[in-house]
């Protein structure tokens, strides 16, 4: 009991700042949730891209913190041939649930992007995000540090918390830009695939009010997001190295996720017929600085793919988590059909 209580108090000191200081959701497979990474990625990689993702963490010693995400994006003018510019759009939904219904957050976001091909292999994209969010809390199921009597949690001790409201909503805006260098994959035969993307975004640029309390005004802090990733084809093989770096900063919180995946193509898909589908798998090893080691695995079959990730906790929280962090999985359906010709999606 004492270990569970210590674990709860430790997790609470991490999660309550999330409620009070409004830290955003994060994923270990962030490249498969593009609309939470950069609004300029809407429609950037596919004519249509649909993703469903689930993340649960800290379930080894407390009620899991659960996140559900669903998103779809695509190119709005994909039927226009020989167009140097591509208009993209997308919609995302995610829900965060902390503990036994103590804190719940739901958001719906719309994204619009425009990608301009400035030369044969170079593209620049700009994006805009608008989001409506709703937060709710149930103080009666929460456990507070003030209710710890020195030996155990005592629900009979008043929490001292005075919620002005148990739910509120907000509206915010975000902007982003992405530069991409990518060789024309559909025309490559014996030349290794090469590509790199660099992006920067800012979410909550209007800093909307975000608080359950009336006595103190808390605004949603701007979240800055930077990423760079690459595809490096290995000559005379069907393998691709995919190094990546993701950095996010929001107020005093920072996250740095970096590592590399290896994708092995088992069978190349045909660009002329649907009967021969691409089959591939990938394995990845990433690190979230001062927090976790992330193991990733993904399987690709034609337009379908699924992936799993597990965070091995290496921070101070590992003292009570026994190195058990978060589990994450996704399923994706992604197609790319330009000018009647199918091309591979990374």
Image: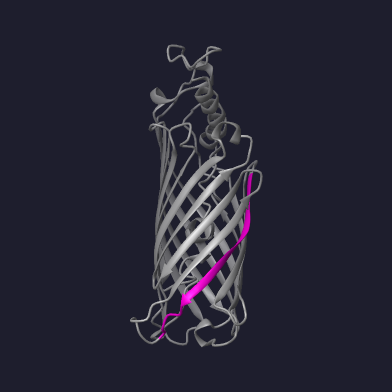
Compared to residue 94, the image places residue 127 above or below, namely below
Residue at 56% x, 34% y is 14
Compared to residue 320, the image places residue 280 above or below, namely below
Q: Is residue 226 magenta?
A: no
Q: Nearer the viewer, residue 184 or 43?
A: 184
Q: Is residue 267 magenta?
A: yes
Q: Nearer the viewer, residue 313 or 127?
A: 313
Percent across and percent down for residue 53 are: 42, 54
Percent across and percent down for residue 255 are: 62, 48
Q: Can residue 131 be seen by looking at this rendering?
A: yes
Going by the image, does 1 lie left or right of 285? left
> Tag count in the figure?
0
Residue at 39% x, 23% y is 140
Percent across and percent down for residue 172 are: 49, 49
Q: Which residues are magenta?
A: 254-271
Residue 100: image quadrant is top left
């Amino acid at each position: 009991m004492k270990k569970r209580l210590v674990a709860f108090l430790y997790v609470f000191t991490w999660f309550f700042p999330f409620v009070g200081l409004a830290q955003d959701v994060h994923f270990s497979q962030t490249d498969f949730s593009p609309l939470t990474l950069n609004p300029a990625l809407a429609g950037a990689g596919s004519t249509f891209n649909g993703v469903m993702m689930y993340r649960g963490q800290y379930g080894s010693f407390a009620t899991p913190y659960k996140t559900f995400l669903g998103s779809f994006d695509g190119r709005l003018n994909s039927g226009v041939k020989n167009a140097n510019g591509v208009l993209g759009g997308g919609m995302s939904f995610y829900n965060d649930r902390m503990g036994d219904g103590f804190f719940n957050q739901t958001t719906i976001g719309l994204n619009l992007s425009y990608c301009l091909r400035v030369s044969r292999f170079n593209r620049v994209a700009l994006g805009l995000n608008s989001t409506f969010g709703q937060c709710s809390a149930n103080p009666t199921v929460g456990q507070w540090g003030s209710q710890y009597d020195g030996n155990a949690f005592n629900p009979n001790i008043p929490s001292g918390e005075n919620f002005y409201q148990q739910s509120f909503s907000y509206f915010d805006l975000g902007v982003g830009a992405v530069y991409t260098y990518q060789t024309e994959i559909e025309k490559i035969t014996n030349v290794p695939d090469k590509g790199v993307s660099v992006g920067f975004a800012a979410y909550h640029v209007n800093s909307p009010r975000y608080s359950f309390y009336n006595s103190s005004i808390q605004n949603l802090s701007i979240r800055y997001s930077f990423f760079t990733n690459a595809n490096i084809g290995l000559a005379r093989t069907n393998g691709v190295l995919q190094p990546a770096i993701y950095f996010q900063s929001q107020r005093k919180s920072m996250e740095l996720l970096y590592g590399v995946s290896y994708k092995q193509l088992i069978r190349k898909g045909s660009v002329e017929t649907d009967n021969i589908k691409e089959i591939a798998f990938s394995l990845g090893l990433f690190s979230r600085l001062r927090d976790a080691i992330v193991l990733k695995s993904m399987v690709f079959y034609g337009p379908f793919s699924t992936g799993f990730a597990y965070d091995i906790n290496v921070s101070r929280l590992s003292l009570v988590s026994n190195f058990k962090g978060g589990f994450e999985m996704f399923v994706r359906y992604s197609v790319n059909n330009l000018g009647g010709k199918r091309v591979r999606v990374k």
